[in-house]
Amino acid sequence: MSKRVLIITYYWPPSAGSGVQRWLKFAKYLPDFGWEPVIFTPENPDFELKDESMLKEILPSTEVLKFPIWEPYGLFRKFKKEKLTDTAKVLGKKQKSLTDKAGIWLRANALIPDPRRFWVKPSVGFLTDLIEKGQFDAIITTGPPHSLHLIGLQLKRKTGITWLADFRDPWSKWEFLDTLPMMKWVRKKHETLEKEVLKESDAIITISPTFQKDFEILSGRKVHLLTNGFDTTDLPENWDDLQTSSDGIEILYTGVIDAIRNPIPFLEALKATFEKTGKDVTLRFVGKVSENVTATIKSDPWFHNQVRLEGYVSHKEVFSFYQKAHLQLLILTDTKNAQGNIPGKLFEYMATGRPILALGDPNGDSAKILNDSNCGKVFRHDDSRGIEDFLRDFKPQMEYKTSLNLEKYSRKNLSLQLAQLLDVQTNSIS
């Protein structure tokens, strides 16, 4: 008989992004290994990017509990009298109004650990009754937002249920916190809350070896590594038969371009390599691109002709772009947490069979995966010479022979590992 695990997540379809796919895929494959997932998620979450096609990936048998959430963003928008659909853009503004600065200060110092904190108390009240009635054998919280771990913490204290805390990003050492005008006592509060979660959860999970090591130092205990991965069923059935065009070079980037993912060094290297050759080269950005980068592309005649801003498309539609690509561009963060940055799309890139050029830490976790698998090469953001040499020598017909069994990164295999961890934890508690 299957056991039931309650997965507490802010991001769930129709929300888009790697954080959604991580737990959507776990929920898809856990039933194969004796665990029935039940999703607990906000009824009215505040996010901009949506992918309605992701709703089709939810198994009909998956129970989804939706519970109302109140978030302060609505008040902020009303006060500013503007339709700001993406609150993160406030941080990226070069010129911030007094209202912007006040909102950022309040976000940093009054909303601890984050604006979703108001969901904690009512959620705990709602879920405690279900847990005490024996509806679940374990719970999992995933953050960010890290306030969701406080739901797990309080449920653990109230009911004693087996609790796994999944960290997709660091908490007190998260680079995002460094962008906020945070008072020292607030930073200490984050550290205190984090220590309580790390101490009282039955198991800690994270996505990269660097984050794993950091959390082990913070917690003084074993931390489990469960990376993101790829789902073989996402690939079109005739994927192996698809061929890219031999005319010119098609380079593809998918995902977000924001303040911590800077494509300008690659753009400059691309221009330096091909501007005077007359070679047909096209770079496509599929996804959200920051206003600053968009302005740079539109203001330069060569970029304007060679770079295509495709905008956001559904996850399913992304594969039509993969099919045409000769080379895939991966831009990793150039920040404090860069070494542990393994974006979910890395594994999808690898599964497509197209070579990868990445900008990031050559000694980071993503670089190790690419080097070990022979799937691509990582250059420092400032290594313009190395990037140009790679592009100059690149041939559209180049293929790589991976030396790594990519099946270890399949969503199904990762779900097996999660199920085994749940088995161990629930058996040890009982």
Image (spheres, rainbow, N blue to C red):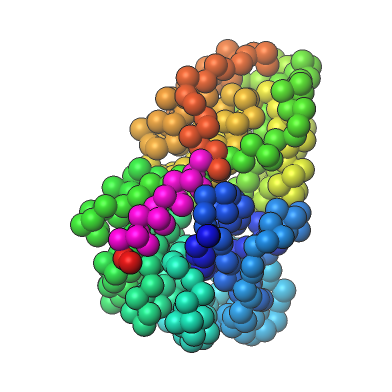
Magenta segment main secondary structure: helix
Residue 58: give x, y in percent of width and height. 68, 57
- Looking at the picture, does residue 254 appear above or below residue 386? below
- Looking at the picture, does residue 299 appear above or below residue 349? below
Does residue 327 appear in this view?
yes
Report the label total. Answer: 0
- Looking at the picture, does residue 361 appear above or below residue 198? above
- Looking at the picture, does residue 121 appear above or below residue 104? below
Magenta segment boundaries in residue numbering = 413-428
Q: What is the residue that sits farthest to the front in this orientation?
A: 1
Q: Is residue 368 or residue 48 the one in the foreground?
A: 368
Q: What is the residue that sits farthest to the left in this orientation?
A: 220
* Quadrant position of the C terminus in the picture: bottom left
Magenta includes 230?
A: no
Does residue 275 appear in this view?
no
Q: Residue placed at 63% from the left, 75% from the top? A: 66
Q: Is residue 251 or residue 213 the one in the foreground?
A: 213
Residue 258: give x, y in percent of width and height. 57, 51
Residue 310: give x, y in percent of width and height. 76, 43
Q: Is residue 137 or residue 126 the one in the foreground?
A: 137
Left or right of 89? Residue 188 is left
Q: Residue placed at 23% from the left, 56% from the top? A: 221
Q: Residue placed at 59% from the left, 24% from the top? A: 355
Magenta includes 420?
A: yes
Q: Residue placed at 57% from the left, 49% from the top? A: 32
Residue 29: give x, y in percent of width and height. 58, 49
